[in-house]
Image (cartoon, rainbow, N blue to C red):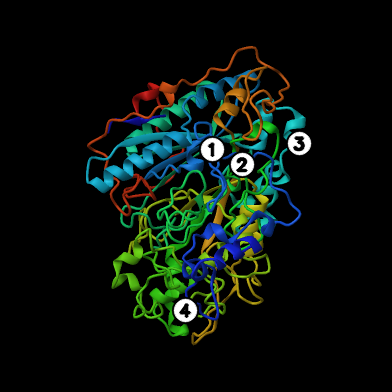
Amino acid sequence: MKPTNSRPSDESQAQAQTQPQPSRPSTWSRRDFVRGTGLSAGVLVSAAACAPGTPPPQNPPSTTTPGTTGPTPDLNLANIQGNILGGFNKDHQRMLFFTFPAGAAARRLLATLQEQVASSEEVLAFNAKYKAAANAGGSLPAATWLNLALTHSGLLALGVSQSDLRAFPDSFRQGMRARSGLIGDSGASAPTHWITSSTDHAVVILAADHVSELDDAARLATAQIEEAGGNVTFDQAGSAREDEPGHEHFGFKDGVSQPGIRGVTTPNNPQNPNQGVPGQDLLWPGEFVLGYPTQIPTGDGINLQPGPLALSGPAWTTDGSYLVFRRLQQDVPGFHNYVSSTATAAGMTTDLLGAKLVGRYKSGCPLEHTDDQAAGLDTQIADPSLRDATLLQETKINNFEFGGDPNGNVCPRSSHIRKSYPRDDQTPTGGEAASQTHRILRRGIPYGASYLAGSTSGANSADVAFPNDRGLLFLCYQSSIERQFEFIQNRWANDPNFPTRGSGEDPIISQSASGAFQLPGSAAHQVTLQGFVTTTGGDYYFQPSIEALQLLATPQQAATPTAPNQPASQPAQQPQVQQPAGQQPPSRTAAQRQPAQSQNQGSQNQGGRANGGQNQGGRDPVGRNQAGQNRTGRLPRDSA
């Protein structure tokens, strides 16, 4: 669907010694070292120092000569689905979970749907256009996007061979339900209580700037699925909160910290070419998309040179990514009541205790001091952004580390943001370089109506029962479910002894109902958590490249996706199928992939950061699941 009109090596140390050196304190954080020398981060690490005995991959994809920034990966953005690297970032989204019809009809349905799939090239171009228009105060463009991801059983339904199916990793083959014990889904979060189907083959992800356009797209996709003989098992709506755009239901700014991606993210400061905005290190794209270089898990985390290529499953998975989906129900009044009562016992304000649990104030301002924050702004008294709103700018809000707060006196070591990304903390699982091999690209959005205190009935009341519940649709992309999502959930969030013995569990995403949480320096010192988040559905998916979708839809001897390090004369392996079809797959023309350039005067999306970014405002008037609704009629594909 388209937009509509609307650590250092000997060599690097020697280089540094030839330049004038400023005075240095006795103890350096990684960030201070980079800033204190006046050097860009890239001169500090060599591949040899990071991974002794491990040669870099032969001919890694690059467009520049290696230097202080390392080679630049050449990504096939036109072949990578759009929500992976671009991020839809729309206020209104729908997820249609469905099963394929039997036999060849499954491939015909996939052929229909894949024609509408948006690429990262399109989405990134649109997001840049949107941001430019918003910054200029002009009319905002609008777009409706579609992406598609498949379960392991969905690949089976499409006729993919047993040899290819067996080539996928255990996590994807088994699915989230089978691995619930590993990630802590037990008790009320056990799969036996989930409301989503256990037999889904695929999910269509839709996103739009306006509810009406989203509904049109959902009606069309549902009609296409049902007319082909498929079955929509669950229809889930998500939308930005109208009352607090960009905030999740507990009230905290969400999606604040995302990894930068080499070859995608533009450095904000040319003098620091290894970061996007300050505090956002650029990671190798193979951490998120198959077929590209990955991070090296040793050194100081800068990773000047590329690591091994990300490989998983059959060869045709190049340019694809693994998607994790979780439907997380939030007990908002329970969370607020807990924070209020516990803050009194801890001897602090409710705002500060909430910030201690999350690691940030509700505004998104971190507890740790940012790089240029005024010394007089004490984060332990109140949210410093109330006195200096510039701290919320994207160039400041993530420019901090945890290394200067080893005991967690400022930001508790088991706070949510420190658990899920320890930054420069030295932990049992490694330092910053190791931690960066566990990053994920988050693409979540709230669902359900906001809770309003005092409301006793209706969508805004405290009732959390389905279908009137509220929470977060958690989506994330990665090249390894085990090394990234499952590692974060199992080894970090759920482990009370990470990063140090007795630190406590993640107070937000840990599935324990009564874990301990350490509050150093407070009157209570330690508090007992309660369960405020319940898993009510989820699964693991593979989101193939656009070319791979074409091949899966009409399998035969045809041109196939080429891995980045392979010459064109040696194409990557195409999907092996049990019942080959005889028709050539349709190819999408350049015109089909080209975003429209005109703008829509009516597109608003101005709550929060109006930059084509995080869930900018507005929500579906219904504000809840749309299963069974708006399925009438087939609409023209470009009508949205």
Vertical side of 503 occupied by 18: above or below: above
Q: Earlier in the sequence, mark 2 or mark 4?
A: 2
Q: Pointers 2 and 4 in contact (CB under 8 A)?
A: no
Residue where numbered disc 1 is placed? 75
Alpha carbon separation for disc pair 1 and 3: 27 Å
Q: Nearer the viewer, mark 3 or mark 2?
A: 2
In which quadrant of the rendered view does residue 130 lie? top left
Q: Nearer the viewer, mark 4 or mark 3?
A: 3
Q: Name the foreground residue: 534 vs 277.
A: 277
User: Can you say which quadrant of the picture contains the C terminus?
Assistant: top left
**Residue at left offset 62%, top offset 60%:** 433
Q: Nearer the viewer, mark 2 or mark 4?
A: 2
Q: Nearer the viewer, mark 1 or mark 3?
A: 1
Crowd class of label 3 (few under 14; some 14 to 19; many from 20; radius 10 Å): few
* Identity, as a three-letter code, of the amino acid under mark 4: Thr
Alpha carbon separation for disc pair 1 and 2: 8 Å
User: What element does badge 4 sit on?
Assistant: helix
Crowd class of label 4 (few under 14; some 14 to 19; many from 20; radius 10 Å): many
Q: Pointers 1 and 2 in contact (CB under 8 A)?
A: yes
Question: Residue lying farthest front?
Answer: 18
Q: Earlier in the sequence, mark 4 or mark 3?
A: 3
* Identity, as a three-letter code, of the amino acid under mark 2: Tyr
- Using the image, tell me which numbered label, if any, was put on residue 342: 4
Residue where numbered disc 3 is placed? 166
Q: Pointers 4 and 3 in contact (CB under 8 A)?
A: no
Q: Earlier in the sequence, mark 1 or mark 2?
A: 1
Image side of residue 611 versus residue 328, left or right: left
Residue where numbered disc 2 is placed? 292
